[in-house]
Image (spheres, rainbow, N blue to C red):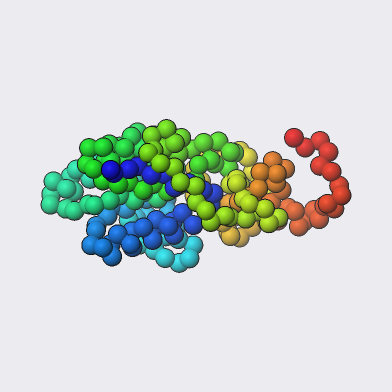
């Protein structure tokens, strides 16, 4: 039976790499897929991984009807055996409903990849709707690590190396950006709560014997 599958994880855990691998494996078996993405780090209409792999994709702005796109392509003689959606957290909730309709009405597997929560630990609307509708949710097993070596569970936005907790939910950036730019860093919950990034941790050089008195 066709499924809507949501692959979730923090930044830097290999979501886009897995999306590219799924596409490669199916293409090698003669299947043809449609890849949607939005605001990829490589630019418009691209699906890329941090390993340097990249392929063409269909840019999906918020006003795009994904179901109608597939119907039009199929009615014009195009072929689609499966659908991949990267950066699915950026999609509007109604677009997630369209993905579910692709599964139910067109009998196509849809593989959606995205992060669940933003830099404020709040659910992205697209991810929330995926959790509500997905037939299956897969948490990626490749663990991103916090600077302390613990498993990273939260995404932090940084400016000048310092963590920020206010601002627009969607600001395109990436990990490993120069410190003066808006960037992102994955942290364990403890250091996300303390707003302690790798940059600020090295700058403060706190002793491990010093308790974080007064921090929530």
Residue 59 seen = no
Residue positioned 81% across, 35% down in the render = 214
Residue drawn 72% across and 43% down? 194
Q: Nearer the viewer, residue 14 or 44?
A: 14
| Residue 197 vs residue 13, the one in the foreground | 13
Query: Where the C terminus falls, by quadrant?
Result: top right
Picture quadrant of residue 107: top left
Rendered image quadrant of residue 5: top left
Residue 83 is left or right of residue 76, and the answer is right
The image shows residue 109 at horizontal and vertical percentages of 30, 47
Q: How many marks?
A: 0
Residue at coordinates 22% horizontally, 52% vertically from top-left?
Answer: 80
Image location (x, y in percent) of residue 169:
52, 39
Question: In x, y percent, where is residue 132?
Answer: 42, 32
- The percent position of residue 120, horizontal first and vertical second, equals 59, 39
Q: From what the image shows, is residue 94 above or below residue 144? A: above
Horizontal side of residue 105 vs 113, given as left or right: left
Farthest residue to the front: give it: 1
On screen, residue 162 versus residue 139, left or right, reads right
Residue 2 drawn above or below residue 49: above
Q: Quadrant of the N terminus?
A: top left
Taking depth in this image into account, of 178 and 103 the one nearest to the observer is: 103
Between 214 and 106, the residue placed more toward the observer is 106
Query: Relative to residue 191, is residue 97 depicted above or below?
Result: above
Residue 80 visible to the viewer: yes
Q: 118 above or below 36?
A: above
Residue drawn at the location 44% of the way across and 36% of the way down? 131
Q: Residue furthest right?
A: 209
């Amino acid at each position: 039976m066709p499924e809507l599958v949501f692959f979730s994880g923090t930044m830097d855990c290999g979501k886009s790499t897995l999306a590219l691998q799924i596409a490669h494996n199916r293409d090698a078996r003669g299947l043809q897929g449609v890849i949607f993405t939005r605001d990829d780090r490589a630019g418009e209409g691209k699906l890329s991984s941090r390993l340097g792999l990249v392929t063409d994709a269909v840019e999906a702005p918020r006003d795009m009807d994904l179901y109608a796109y597939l119907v039009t392509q199929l009615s014009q003689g195009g072929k689609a055996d499966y659908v991949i959606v990267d950066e699915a957290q950026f999609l509007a909730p109604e677009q997630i409903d369209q993905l579910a309709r692709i599964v139910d009405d067109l009998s196509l597997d849809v593989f959606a990849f995205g992060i669940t929560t933003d830099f404020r630990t709040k659910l992205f609307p697209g991810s929330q709707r995926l959790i509500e509708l997905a037939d299956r949710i897969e948490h990626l097993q490749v663990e991103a690590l916090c600077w302390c070596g613990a498993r990273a569970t939260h995404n932090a936005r940084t400016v000048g190396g310092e963590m920020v907790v206010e601002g627009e939910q969607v600001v395109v950036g990436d990990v490993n950006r120069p410190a003066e730019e808006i960037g992102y860093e994955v942290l364990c919950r403890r250091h996300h709560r303390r707003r302690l990034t790798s940059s600020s941790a090295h700058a403060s050089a706190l002793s491990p014997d010093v308790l974080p008195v007064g921090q929530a």
